[in-house]
Amino acid sequence: MLLVIGRTIKESFINFWRNGWLSIASVSVLTLSLYVVGALLVILLVSNTILKGVESRINVSVYFKPDITEDRIMTVKTELEKFSEVKSVEYVSKDKALEDFKKNNAGEPVIIQSLDEIGGNPLLASLVVKANSPDQYQSIAEYIGKADYENDISRINYAKNKVIIDKLNDIIGQAKKVGTAVALVFAAVSVLIIFNTIRITIYIHKSEIEVMRLVGASNFFIRMPFLFEGIIYGVVSSLLATILLLISIKLVNPYIPSSTVSRSLISFYLSNFWFVLGVQMLFGVALGLVSSWVAMRKYLKI
Amino acid sequence: MKKIQEKITEDQIEDQMEENIQPEKRKFPILKFDHVSKIYKGDFTALEDIDFEIQEGEFVSLVGHSGAGKSTLLKLIYAEEAATDGDVYFDEEPLSKVKRSKLPYHRRKIGTVFQDFKLLPKKTAFENVAYALEVCGVPTEEIMEDVPQILDIVGLGDKMHKFPLQLSGGEQQKVVLARALIHKPLVIVADEPTGNLDPKNSIDMVELLLKVNRLGTTVILASHNRDIVDLVDRRVILLEKGRIICDEARGKYKTC
């Protein structure tokens, strides 16, 4: 059995090599479609990371009136923590708020100066509420607005980031749609071209196939080289597509501010390298196998 | 008188050989056509109600004009085509019941020889014969041992590393016969094996087939060549328009 498989693999490599231009056509189209798949995957991964980053930054800030005591705020905090939607509640005291404010505006002496002029601490104590998922903020904010400690609250601040998230979600959805459509078109073209290549391979090997049948080669043995050829197309193309993807990410890299993904695009890709390559290879091998299988069913009489 | 004596001694040798090679003789026919018809697409009847048996060790000449159905009949034996009606029994097994995936194993029990050789041009004589074993998963050592042996039997021992184009038609056909024999088949099916050969090579070929037959292999030879069939001088089945019109145990082309 092992012997048979070894011989068929050898046979398919020879086929692949001798087919020359046909192999190049098949491989290049499949490479393109796998490149699109890979690029789509990277874009989705990146945008998901961005989305996660933005999501983690949104919260509902509940500012309390200046005369509310810290004890009172803590009671509200424990109450809020009881909700299943609420992931965490963080207390920011007046002093902490001032500190943060100063830190954030350290580069702007005018603001610091005006703060000093006011004297005392004009900032309010607040609770920073984070929800488990972005769409729960609305209901949390509404609840707090109607709760019995409503009068203690100066203002609730939540809507700020919602627009950004919606927009981002929209972009990701569009990218998914367009990317999938392009990938599907390329995939269909590659299936057709590989199908044709295998068909021609079968035609070229007509006399060999006939002899094989006559001397009693098993169906498995006759079919294997063609299936392997399909697999070889998949593997070679996914490797080429990976090289192409690496090059294009290197080219694009300088234009993407690293802050969006919290690190450079290239390192982001490299950390997901095996996953992307794996998906590409799986996709490529599946396409190669399917097309040679169909060609065989149609043209290889056994 | 002398001829008869020759014949007797030859028969004795045959008997001895059979005893040596095949101690057990089958009680059932190796091949049986049970009221077989073959109708191709488009309502073309190639064979009609073919009914005969072949015992193991027989040498049967299948004769008839081109288009009489000889090739179709042979195709039914090596399962290239399936019978439309009736059934072909090979080694007691009805071929219609053999699964497609098991057909290769059936074909290994049959060696085929064709008019147009069907050799692979890019392989040497040795490689062509070895190929038949390779595709069946025979280990390399066994191939290295068996192939030269069989090429010696057909008389090509010294030319086994030549390519088909470097060989004469007669020699190519011997390579084909070697390839057909390499699996030690039960039956050799030869479809016009002498069709592309000159008279001398044709006689050589027939003598080789007779030798193979003497060694115990059943041979079915399809031919429209009168001289060849008369030379064999064994059982003759005459086909005409898809029917058997005559089946003689020991016949000549014209007597049939």
Image (cartoon, coloured by chain):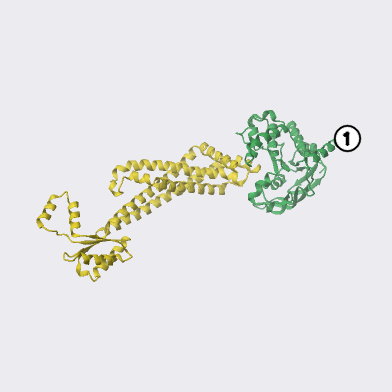
Chain colours: A yellow, B green
Q: Chain of mark 1?
A: B
Residue A235 lies left or right of residue B105; in this view the side is left
What amino acid type is highlighted by mark number 1? Answer: Gln
Residue A7 lies left or right of residue A34; in this view the side is right
Q: Nearer the viewer, residue B80 or A59?
A: A59
Does residue A254 appear in the picture of this structure?
yes
From the top left corner, tell me how far across and down residue B80 is, in percent.
66, 47
From the top left corner, tell me how far across and down residue B201 is, in percent.
73, 32
Extreme bottom residue here? A148
Residue A297 lies left or right of residue A103; in this view the side is right
Q: Quadrant of residue B144?
A: top right
Q: Secondary structure at mark 1?
A: helix
Residue for point 40% across, 41% down: A243
Does residue B129 appear in the picture of this structure?
no
Extreme top residue here? B158
Residue A115 vs B172, above or below: the answer is below
Residue for point 46% across, 48% down: A282
Residue A71 vs A229, above or below: the answer is below
Residue B52 vs B158, above or below: the answer is below
Residue B12 vs B243, above or below: the answer is above
| Pointer 1 local density, CA inside 10 Å: few below 14, some 14–19, many at least 20 | few
Q: Nearer the viewer, residue A39 or B174?
A: A39
From the top left corner, tell me how far across and down residue A186 is, in percent.
43, 48
Extreme right residue here? B1
Q: Quadrant of residue B107?
A: top right
How many numbered dots are placed on residues in this image? 1
Q: Nearer the viewer, residue B81 or A2?
A: A2
From the top left corner, tell me how far across and down residue B255 is, in percent.
82, 42
Please name the residue that numbered disc 1 is placed on: B5
- Position of the N terminus of chain A by quadrant: top right
Extreme left residue here? A117
